[in-house]
Amino acid sequence: MGAPRKKTIIDSEEEEEVSAEVEESSDEAPAPRSKRSITASNKQASLDKENFEAKLKKLEALQKEVNKMKKKSKEASKSKSKDYVPDDDDVESEDEMFEKTGFSSSIKPLATVAVTNRADDIRTPLKRIGAAAAQKPVLPPRISSNAFKTLPPPAPTSSDCEDVDGSGPSGPGSSSPTVAAQKRQRSGSASDGSEELLVDPASKKTKTAEPVPASKTTVATPAFRSGADVNPKKLKASDFEEVVRALILRAASEYESLVSTSDALPDTAKRFKWARQSWKNACLAAEEPYKITDGISSILQKRGSRIRGHALNQIRPLMVNVFGFKRGTDAKTVAWNRDLYTKLKTKAAFHYKNPETLSGYAQGKIISEILHAVWFEDTNSQGVTFKNLFDPIPLETLALIFTILDFCLDEWSDGTRVKAKLWGKDIKDRHEIFHKDLAEWAALNVEVVTAIRRKLYTRSCRNAGVVTQNANKPTLSAEAKERAREELAGRTGETDSEMED
């Protein structure tokens, strides 16, 4: 038989202890849940704290706004009651009201006062009508940037050697008598001109008995436009006020015309001289005497490269439209372009009227096309405005055309156009050659060559839309006058054949 089994006897007390332990273990099981609930309550508390702080900040902001409104209402009440001295019993102190009452209760009366004063501040301004409106100051009209651009050049005077900015023989701060006279006439000043006469640099005296204030003896200084973002190293005409901007564009147009007709590649001294000359003529033409600053002079001197670049951009399309170059990279097109390039470059045949026979020197169709595209586009173009420079077409203008034409032809030397940059130093040699050739051509027969150049100018003006004086001839010739005399002989003007009114 096997070993006897041991029986474990558990009395009632031990059962109670075991059940107690089981109950304790069962009570400890949901402990993690209590921890999660505690964490959630902490987050809620932090959110409540943030909301409370935000509301507190809003209250502080409202407190500051109330203080501002209270101060503003005090100032308004003081300004309205300067002559009125109230009794002490009638005065209600806002300080006392605000201090004695709580924060929330003090907002209502202050808000009422503040709204009343703010309504007065934003009240629609009154408008003048009738006779009062006529006395209202009128602002000067805005000036277009091209207001002075097409003004004709001023007539030469004995003071041409003087500079408008006073750097010439006239001395600092003075201007030519012509400018002063024009200024007086335009402003409608008194006949004695005491407010407009300028100081004579030689005698340091004015033409009037009484001395003229120093502020009246100097020409105006160019000022920048309000709100302009000015870069001193890259000044533009648009950086200046309206009148000065219009003067700069007028002077720039004349400067470009000087480069186009006198010297396409001027040296430093000539550029400086032309900038001052163009500025002076612009001031004279517009009757607006202003000093020329270094910045304005720099803007004008840069216009030389601009007109050369403009001519280049206008001539490039004519290579295709006039000469017949073809765009493409196939072998047939490349061969065509190479043959055409060789034909036009040989003995500079590109500017002849007939490139085959080399006849019609400087009279090719492309010359007229270039003149029209660059300088005679319309009635406001440089060639029309500055007739004194372009009539007849100068040899220097033809030399510039020849130079840029030759440069554009070289872009097609390989059979396809390869765009290149135009630098003055790179075209200087070929420009001198063309200028020398044109001078020799003109010397062969001065009268005929001058007539050819004048014809070029007349044709260019006609293409620009200018009506010449010859087109406005009288229509009543001598023969027409004689016939009219015979018809009117013996008539009274009251015959039966005439129509009655």
Image (cartoon, rainbow, N blue to C red):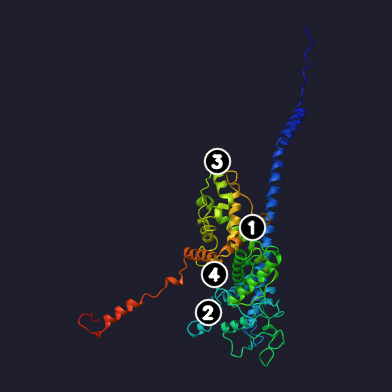
Secondary element at tag 4: helix
Q: Residues within 10 Å of mark 3 (few under 14, many from 20)?
A: some
Q: Which residue is mark 3?
A: 335
| Residue 272 or residue 392, whichever sits in front | 392
Dot label at residue 385: 4
- The Cα atoms of the two marked residues, 2 and 4, are separated by 49 Å
Q: Please name the residue shown 61% across and 91% down the image.
A: 192
Give the amino acid at mark 4.
Thr
| Residue 54 or residue 439, whichever sits in front | 439
Q: Classify 381 as above or below 141.
A: above
The earlier-in-sequence mark between 4 and 1 is 4
- The Cα atoms of the two marked residues, 2 and 1, are separated by 69 Å
- The Cα atoms of the two marked residues, 4 and 3, are separated by 44 Å
Q: Which residue is mark 1?
A: 431
- The Cα atoms of the two marked residues, 1 and 3, are separated by 29 Å
Q: Is residue 91 left or right of residue 484?
A: right
Q: Are marks 2 and 1 in contact (CB under 8 Å)?
A: no
Give the amino acid at mark 1.
His
- The Cα atoms of the two marked residues, 4 and 1, are separated by 26 Å
> In which quadrant will I find the C terminus?
bottom left
Give the amino acid at mark 3.
Ala
Q: Residues within 10 Å of mark 2 (few under 14, many from 20)?
A: few
Q: Classify 254 as above or below 494.
A: above
Q: Residues within 10 Å of mark 4 (few under 14, many from 20)?
A: many
